[in-house]
Image (tube, coloured by chain):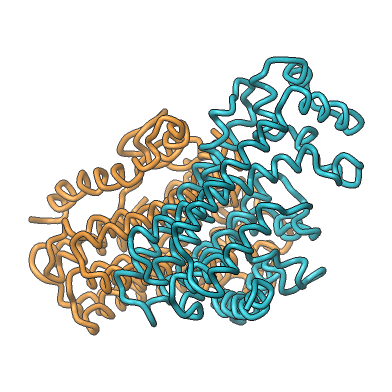
Chain colours: A orange, B cyan
C-alpha cells in the first residue's frame, strides 16, 4: 500500500469522524450554527467538496504516525479529528484577524456571517476538538488520553504565541531573522509536531520514539513554512502575475524578506519606503534574490528538511505506513504550487 | 467558618492559582501578550485590583462544592482556575461580539489592543483553561481528570450554543418566552452547573450526589439570570437614571421583555416601533409591569430559586462549607444591585 492508497482509505474515515464530531451542533435550534461549521469544513454551501476541505495533512500525519508506530490507525481517528479541528478553529479566527475574505477560493466565515458569528464558530470548533480528543477514552487508557490532550493543549498555546508575534510584528520595522523562528515555530510547526507526537504516543512508541516523531514533525513544519515563504516571493504564479498574493505586496515578515531587511541594502531601503506595488513585484524579487535571500532561504529549507528526514529515520517507522509517511513528507517538502 | 471567612481564605488561593496558570505566557518574547491577559484578569494596568477581577463566583462554587462533598478544597484549585479562565475567555470574546467598550469599569481588551489581539487573548485564556484542568492529574486519578475536563468541555459547547442563539435573536422579532430558556441555559447556567458538578466530582460525591449538585448549579444560574433580567428593567439605578444601561434601551431579549412581546399589547406595539429612548425608560417599564411581565419574571425566579435550593438540600452538603455554599446561593439569589 502506497501513500495514494493510504490517502484513499484514510480520508473518508477522517471526514466521517470530523462530521460525527461536528454533528454535536446538528440540533433544531442550532442548525444554522451547525451549517456555519460545515460550510467552513468544506462540506456544505457554495463550492463545497474536495477543493474546499483542504488536504487534511495533519490528521493524515496523526494516522500515519500511529500506524507506522505499530497501532491500528482507526483507533487514532478521534485524535486525528481533534488536530484538524484545532487547525480549522485557528483558520476561522485567522481570517478575521487578517481581514481575509477568501479561504480555499470561497468566502470566509466572517464575510458570510459577520465577525461576531465567526468568532463563535472558531470557538465551537475548538471546543469540539477538545471533545473529540476525549473520545479516545473509548479505546485508550485514561492516562494516555490525558497525555494526548496535553500535547495538543501545549501546541494550541504555541499557536496563540505565534499568532501574537505575527500580529505584533506588523507594526515593527526592526525585525531580524532571529524573530522569524519563534513565530513560525508557533504558527506552523507546533501543530504538525503535535500530530506526529500524538500519533507515536497512540501507536505505543516508547519515549525515544515519540521524541523522534515529534522532532520530525517540528522540522517538517519549519521546512514546509520556509518553502512556502520562498514560493511567496519567487513562486511561478506570482512571478507570472497569475496570482497577486505576493508576500512582498502583502508585507509579510517571511524568512527571505527578513533576511533582506537585515542586509540593509537596496531591498531594505525600498522596503522602508512603504508598500510594494504589484508592478514592482518582479524587480523587487530580483533585487532580493541578488542580495542572497533566496539562497539563504533555500539553504535553511534544506537544513530543516535534512533534520526532519533524519529524525524520521531515527523513529524507524514500520511497514507500509512507514513508507507512506516518508512519501508524504517528501510531497510536502518538494511541493510546487 | 462562615462564607465571609471562606472567601477570605479561598480568594487569595484562587488568584494565586490563576496567576500561576496564566504565567505560561510570561516569557520575554510574549510579555506584552501576557500583559493583555493579566490586564483582563484585573491584576495589572489602569484600575487593577479587586473591582477589576470580578467576584470569582464560579471558582468559589467549585471549591465550596468540593469541600462540602467532603474533599480538601485545595486539591480542586486547578479546576476552579479552569472554570474561571473559561468564563474570562468568553467575556473577552463577548466584548468583541457585543462591541462593548467597558468591562467592570475599565476599557475592554479589544478597545485597548484591537479586535485581532482580543480574539487571540480569548483563545489563549481558553487554552490555558484546558491546561489548568490537566494539572488535576497531579492529585486525582486520570479517569476523574478526564471526567472533569469533559464536563467543562460540554459546558463550553453550551456557551457557544447560547452565544449563537443570543446573536441570532438580535435580528428576530418573532421571539417568545420559549426561546429564552435555551439561550440562557447556555449563556449562564451551563458554566455554573459545570462548577457545582465538577466540585462534587472532585469531592468524591456519588453519582446521585453529583447530579444534585449539577442541578443546583443549573437552577441557580437560571434564577440568577432572571433576577438580573428583572434588575435590567426595574433596578433602582436604572429607574432613578443613575445607570443608562436599561435592557429596554439596549433591546435585550430578556425574560420580561419577551413576555411583554408575547402579550401583544401596548408594550409589544411600542417595542415594534424601534429603539426605546432613555427618557421613555420609566414609562415603558411601568407599561411592561402593568402587563404582568414583572410578576411573571418574579414568579419564574422564585420557581428556579426553589428548585435550586431543593437540589442543594438533596445534595446534603457537609460542614461549614455546606453552610457557606447555601449562604453564597442566597447572596446570589437575593442580590440587590
Toward the bottom, the furthest residue is: A208
Whether B95 is drawn above or below B164: the answer is below
Residue B21 location in percent, x, y? 54, 76
Which residue occupies the foreground of this view, A334 or B308?
B308
Whether A105 is drawn above or below A131: the answer is above
Q: Residue at x 35, y 63 (%)?
A: B147
Residue B337 location in percent, x, y? 79, 52
Give the quadrant of residue A46: top left
Give the quadrant of residue B303: top right
Residue A301 location in percent, x, y? 39, 71
Q: Residue at x 27, y 56 (%)?
A: A78
Please indicate, yes or no, whether residue A165 appears anywhere in the rendered image. no
Which residue occupies the foreground of this view, B223 or A254?
B223
Residue B38 location in percent, x, y? 67, 71
Which residue occupies the foreground of this view, B328 or A58?
B328
Whether B82 is drawn above or below B193: the answer is below
Which residue occupies the foreground of this view, A146 or B302?
B302
Please indicate, yes or no, whether residue A133 appears anywhere in the rendered image. yes
Q: Residue at x 44, y 70 (%)?
A: B69
**Left/right of residue B246 with respect to residue B93 in the rendered view:** right
Quadrant showing the N terminus of chain B: bottom right
Give the quadrant of residue B304: top right
Amino acid at each position: 500500500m502506497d501513500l495514494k492508497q493510504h490517502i484513499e482509505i484514510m480520508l473518508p474515515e477522517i471526514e466521517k469522524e470530523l462530521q460525527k464530531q461536528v454533528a454535536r451542533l446538528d440540533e433544531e435550534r442550532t442548525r444554522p450554527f451547525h451549517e456555519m461549521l460545515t460550510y467552513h469544513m468544506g462540506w456544505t454551501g457554495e463550492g463545497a467538496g474536495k477543493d474546499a476541505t483542504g488536504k487534511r495533512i495533519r490528521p493524515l500525519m496523526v494516522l500515519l504516525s500511529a500506524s507506522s508506530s505499530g497501532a491500528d490507525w482507526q483507533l487514532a481517528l478521534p485524535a486525528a479529528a481533534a488536530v484538524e479541528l484545532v487547525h480549522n478553529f485557528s483558520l476561522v479566527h485567522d481570517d478575521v484577524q487578517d481581514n481575509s475574505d477568501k479561504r480555499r477560493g470561497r468566502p470566509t466565515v466572517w464575510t458570510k456571517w459577520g465577525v461576531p458569528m465567526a468568532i463563535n464558530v472558531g470557538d465551537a470548533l475548538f471546543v469540539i476538538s477538545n471533545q473529540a480528543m476525549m473520545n479516545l477514552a473509548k479505546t485508550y487508557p485514561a492516562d494516555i488520553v490525558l497525555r494526548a490532550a496535553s500535547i495538543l493543549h501545549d501546541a494550541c498555546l504555541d499557536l496563540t504565541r505565534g499568532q501574537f508575534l505575527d500580529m505584533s510584528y506588523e507594526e515593527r520595522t526592526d525585525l531580524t531573522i532571529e524573530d522569524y523562528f519563534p513565530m513560525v515555530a508557533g504558527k506552523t510547526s507546533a501543530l504538525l509536531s503535535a500530530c506526529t507526537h500524538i500519533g507515536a504516543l497512540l501507536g505505543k512508541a516508547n519515549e525515544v520514539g515519540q521524541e523522534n516523531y515529534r522532532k520530525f514533525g517540528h522540522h517538517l513544519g519549519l521546512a514546509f513554512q520556509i518553502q512556502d515563504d520562498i514560493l511567496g516571493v519567487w513562486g511561478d504564479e506570482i512571478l507570472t502575475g497569475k496570482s497577486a498574493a505576493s508576500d512582498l505586496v502583502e508585507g509579510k515578515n517571511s524568512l527571505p524578506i527578513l533576511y533582506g531587511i537585515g542586509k540593509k541594502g537596496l531591498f531594505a531601503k525600498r522596503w522602508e519606503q512603504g508598500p510594494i506595488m504589484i508592478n514592482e513585484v518582479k524587480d523587487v524579487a530580483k533585487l532580493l534574490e541578488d542580495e542572497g535571500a533566496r539562497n539563504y532561504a533555500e539553504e535553511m529549507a534544506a537544513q530543516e528538511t535534512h533534520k526532519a528526514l533524519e529524525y524520521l529515520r531515527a523513529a524507524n517507522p514500520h511497514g507500509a505506513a512507514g513508507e507512506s509517511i516518508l512519501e508524504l513528507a517528501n510531497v510536502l517538502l518538494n511541493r510546487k504550487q
